[in-house]
Image (tube, helix red, strand yellow):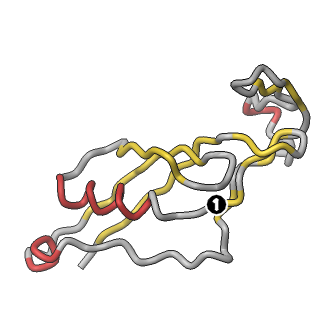
Amino acid sequence: MSGDFSELGAVQNPTYTKLDGTKFSGEYKPSLTDLRVPRKPLHFPFWRALAKDSASILVYFVVDETGKVVSAHIANPTGKSFDESVLEGVKQWRYIPATIGGHPVKDIAGARVEFSD
């Protein structure tokens, strides 16, 4: 596979319209983890640790134009305590925002979170 992802149907030069009606287009660059901001470890629920429970949770989230996670959704709910821990933790993560033509835009990202004893 080449590096341009055209085989996947990616949009080469998307157009983005802001809420105020301003439009711009250009090269899309996805949001990236901001390594300048250390991530706190996610909380492993105590009683789940005692029971030696484990979980693999897929979470999708929206990163706004400032790099902040503004909403998150668990794709495969596993149980209230794990899910709450992931949602709470993900909303503290920071990103370098996605851009289109050099303009920051909202983006959807995802991550798999593994809990094990």
Position of residue 90 in the picture relative to residue 11 (left or right): left
Q: Position of residue 83 (x, y in %)?
A: 27, 54
Q: Quadrant of the C terminus?
A: bottom left
Q: Is residue 105 above or below residue 24?
A: below
Which residue: 35% across, 55% down? 87
**Residue toward you, 9 or 62:** 62
Left/right placement of residue 78 relative to residue 74 reads left
Q: Is residue 117 above or below residue 2?
A: below
Residue occupying image coordinates x 52% and y 64%: 93
Instruction: Give the quadrant of residue 94.
Output: bottom right
Location of residue 64 in the rendering, given as x and y in whole percent from the top left corner: 62, 46
Left or right: 15 with respect to 38?
right
Q: Residue furthest front?
A: 20
Q: Which residue is mark 1?
A: 95
The extreme top residue here reads 21
Find residue 85 and report its image quarter: bottom left
Q: Secondary structure at mark 1?
A: strand
- Residue placed at 80% from the left, 39% from the top? 5
Residue 80 in the image, given as x and y percentages of width and height? 18, 53
Asked if residue 50 is positioned above or below residue 32 in the image, the reply reads below
Local packing at callout 1 (Cα closer than 10 Å; few below 14, some 14-19, many 20+) is some
Horizontal placement of 58 versus 50: left or right?
right
Q: Amino acid at mark 1?
A: Tyr
Nearest the camera: 95 or 18?
18
